[in-house]
Amino acid sequence: MLTKKDIRKQFLERRLNLDAGTAAALNSRLLENCRQLDYSGVHRVHTFLPITEKKEVNTWPIIRWLRQTYPHLQWVLPRALLSTGEMEHFLWEEHTPLVNSRYGIPEPAGGMRIAPEALDLVLVPMLAFDRAGHRVGYGKGMYDRFLQQCRPDVRTVGLSLFEPVNVIIDTDDHDVPLDTVVTPDTIFHFDKK
């Protein structure tokens, strides 16, 4: 049985060891599965932009496809406040300037702030997840704190390049399980009740 720390190390290493061709193929198949999701009732989408050096899921093609297919969607991006472990959220418009944080995360330089309660769908980054919908991120707890601020009916969709581990043994009460996780091979739906 693996702890979050073990899983974090193992899956970050797996991702960093992907060659460019394999990573591109996985991201392409993940996009195909994202096209199968139901986006009805969604008006505001919160997304992350990938940290290229960490070979995170490439959300750019997903965003492009959603923008073309659902032009009415409004987009929201986070900005990490590393001193507090919190995130701010900004409307992402055509003219919104993006700057790389010290961790290489493309973030909005500013703009119109959006409250977490105003979001309908959140695309969630991760290193790994289990068969109950619990995720392992980088260990700062920022996304769990953020998801707790969202409405109870917000739809959370994790994006992973890998299939799940069976169980994360050291989840705790502040961990927020996801509704759905999309991988290159499967779409997992979880019952959070």
Image (cartoon, rainbow, N blue to C red):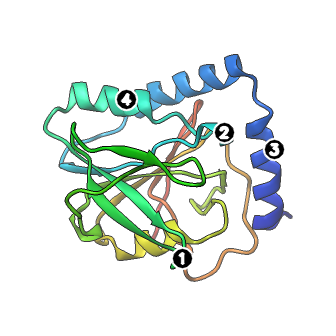
As drawn, the residue found furthest toward the left would be: 72
Q: CA distance from mark 4 to mark 2?
A: 26 Å
Q: CA distance from mark 1 to mark 3?
A: 27 Å
**Residue 128 in view, yes or no:** yes
81 sits left or right of 126 in the view: left
In the picture of the structure, the residue carrying the numbered disc 3 is 13
Which of 26 and 89 lies nearest the eye of the viewer?
89
Circle 4: residue type: Arg
- The mark closer to the camera, 1 or 3, is 1
Q: Secondary structure at mark 3?
A: helix
Examine the image and state in which quarter residue 60 appears.
top left
Q: Residue at x 57, y 83 (%)?
A: 173
Disc 1 crowd, CA 10 A, few/some/many (<14, 14-19, 20+): few
In the picture of the structure, the residue carrying the numbered disc 1 is 83
Disc 4 crowd, CA 10 A, few/some/many (<14, 14-19, 20+): few
1 sits left or right of 107 in the view: right
Q: Secondary structure at mark 1?
A: loop
Q: Residue at x 64, y 56 (%)?
A: 131
Circle 1: residue type: Ser
- The mark closer to the camera, 2 or 3, is 2
Query: Is label 1 in contact with label 2 (beta carbons under 8 Å)?
Result: no
Q: Residue at x 67, y 74 (%)?
A: 171
